[in-house]
Amino acid sequence: NTIANEQAAEVRTTCPYCGVGCGVLARVASDGEVSVRGDPDHPANRGRLCSKGAALGETMGLEGRVLHPEVGGKRADWDAALDLVARRFSEAIAEHGPDSVAFYISGQLLTEDYYVANKMMKGFIGSANIDTNSRLCMASSVAGHRRAFGEDVVPGVYEDFEEADLVVLTGSNTAWCHPILYQRILAARHARGTKIVVIDPRRTATADECDLHLALDPGTDVLLFNGLLAHLARSGAVDESYVAAHTCGFDSAIQVASADAPTVEKVAAGCGLTVADVRLFYELFTTHERAVTVYSQGVNQSAHGTDKVNAIINCHLATGRIGKPGTGPFSVTGQPNAMGGREVGGLANQLAAHMSFENPADIERVARFWNAPKMARKGGLKAVDLFQAAGDGRVKALWIMGTNPVVSMPDAGRVRAALKACDFVVVSDVARTDTTRYADVFLPAAGWGEKDGMVTNSERRLSRQRPFMPIAGEVRADWRIISDVARRMGFGEAFDYANPARIFREHAALSAFENAGERLFDIGALATLSDASYQAFEPRHWPMPIGHEANERLLGDGWFPTPDGRARFVPVRQEGFAQTTDAAYPLVLNTGRLRDQWHTMTRTGAVPRLMANAPDPVIDLHPLDAAARGLSEGDLAHLSTRYGFARAKVRITNAQRPGQAFLPMHWSGHFAGAAAAGQLASPVTDPYSGQPELKQVPLRVTREQTA
Ligand code: SF4
């Protein structure tokens, strides 16, 4: 009986960390202890969990949480706090116009939270000043997809990783950052001999089991893939009938690529690789029809991220390897609901449901659907610009939801100054963070285990996050907090939501509405989902073409959502670097994740066994660079860039190439004296996506002078 009761109490939910979107079974014992295990029935992970997911049960304590609203750092009741937020936002809008307010939201938010925030800002306040920390994660992929496919369409599914004969992992330490996907790739390799190519300036754990590691010079990805496109043309590997029937722009793309990368020797020299290695990569890609190119932040977080994405997509279009089993360019997202945010349009330059500010008919369609009194007519401020505007007085009231920008944003020192300067700052979050100290009003939000809603993973699979704990203290769900403020600002019954199911139905109806008369996807059924069906919802892809069953890939029929139904080749050139090293800053700083930590460690930092492997921030240096600075293993180093400085312990490793350094992105001021990668990083952004260049910053390393 006891066992039966315990099993009955197990709740099916979804991991709140990375974009793999693993299913989790969570259970609360009678003593309050939470245990988790991988959901064997969830298609993303089939029962597996990585180190972070497996430790979720140890992160459920209340330390660091604030369970009631605060105004000016003092406890307040909800009515007083919400009234104040509504009044200050309304006053700013009345006095300075709708663009004087902004929301900065998060890929941690559930789809329903995202939808309500987006609707409030774009349809009722009348500004598109709503951007998300996903801007730092996948905006270049979105822009690259839109340039090539006409819309932000992710064609593939995770099964492609297992059905491919060649997996190219570029700019992605998959073994640490998307561990369950990496395990799936390795299992396929052991079962069927999948070839793996890793393209990364660092030798990471992902390169431990690969056929070829290309440690290219940072920022030379376009040259490498332009060389591949030229090689495909030279070797007769272009699928000419596919190119003729389903694409346009091939001739100019191949012309530019051939001029940029005329020979393998030129590519090798330009990328800092050997001719033999480049040739081997090109041969592997040419001879393996089933090839997937998986890419992540090493591609996206760049001043030329969108061009890198299109250089990759060009090679898949040239070979017709899109939307078919075991093929495709595949962007893996960092956050649990980055994809859900894309679906609702939660980026400053998107409208909703893949509609565009560039199309007046789209604006009218969304305005009609929302019955919006003040519809935004143009894109708003993207993340870096948004904080700049908060600092220089253009944004008077800023609401930050579920994210910690004073640690994660590039040039974080300037972000801190902006928050100090901004007239009115609201932060809603689960726990106290480095950012909450700048809040005029703090609104306590429900956390994982309390929240109820939908997330979408990197393969467009919807899954439910379900509550399995009672709501702590006075905290509230994000969608409810946003709706509470919206109603107080006079936006009325448009925000009268009884539950998240009601919001999800509205989101699905808007998406179906958008597709009416065009391509029909099976979204309409989701728009009429009953509350009970929403509760019992099984993971499934979004959207799915009508009449198809699970695991449907998109774009496989060669139709693209462009005016003429054809994909676009985008001619791209290898550009010079946004910032170059010099005598003062001679090293190139790369930043990234550790296996056991998530973002700014507000959750994983509380688990001793996750901290045990890497308790301190460490800067990785090549032996030659360490020796040149008189640094030994474990020394404390002073790190400085043109933007700020930090401290970290030295680790000497041959995984780094000479002239390059690596610092994890996680640490913050919470960990005294620690490095904050965001403080060092540059605010230079990609011109198409607005994504900052977090991977390639000129750096000086010296011995820290201790008192
Ligand atoms: Fe969670 Fe990602 Fe690990 Fe899966 S791979 S358990 S989603 S952190």
Image (cartoon, rainbow, N blue to C red):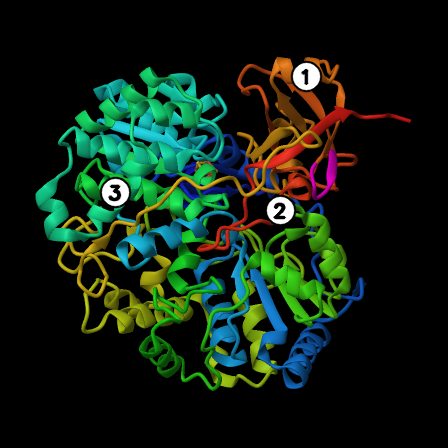
Closer to the camera: disc 2 or disc 1?
A: 1
Q: Which mark is residue 408?
A: 2
Query: Is 549 positioned to the left or the right of 181 in the image?
Result: left
- Does residue 480 sit above or below 622 in this rendering? below
**N-term mark: 3 or 1:** 3
* Rendered location of residue 661, percent (x, y): 60, 26
**For the residues carrying marks 3 and 1, which lies nearer the camera in this image?**
3
Q: Position of residue 67 (x, y in %)?
A: 69, 58
Residue located at (30% from left, 37% from top): 259
- Which disc, if any, is residue 537? none
State the quadrant of the C terminus. Answer: top right
Q: Residue at x 24, y 48 (%)?
A: 252
Q: Quadrant of residue 510?
A: bottom left
Q: Is residue 42 left or right of residue 495?
A: left
Structural distance between the alpha carbons of marks 2 and 3: 39 Å
Residue 325 lies, in percent from the top left, at 18, 38
In-front residue for pair 133/220: 220
- Would you name the residue on which mark 1 appears? 626
- Magenta stretch: includes residue 520: no
Which mark is first along the chain, 1 or 2?
2
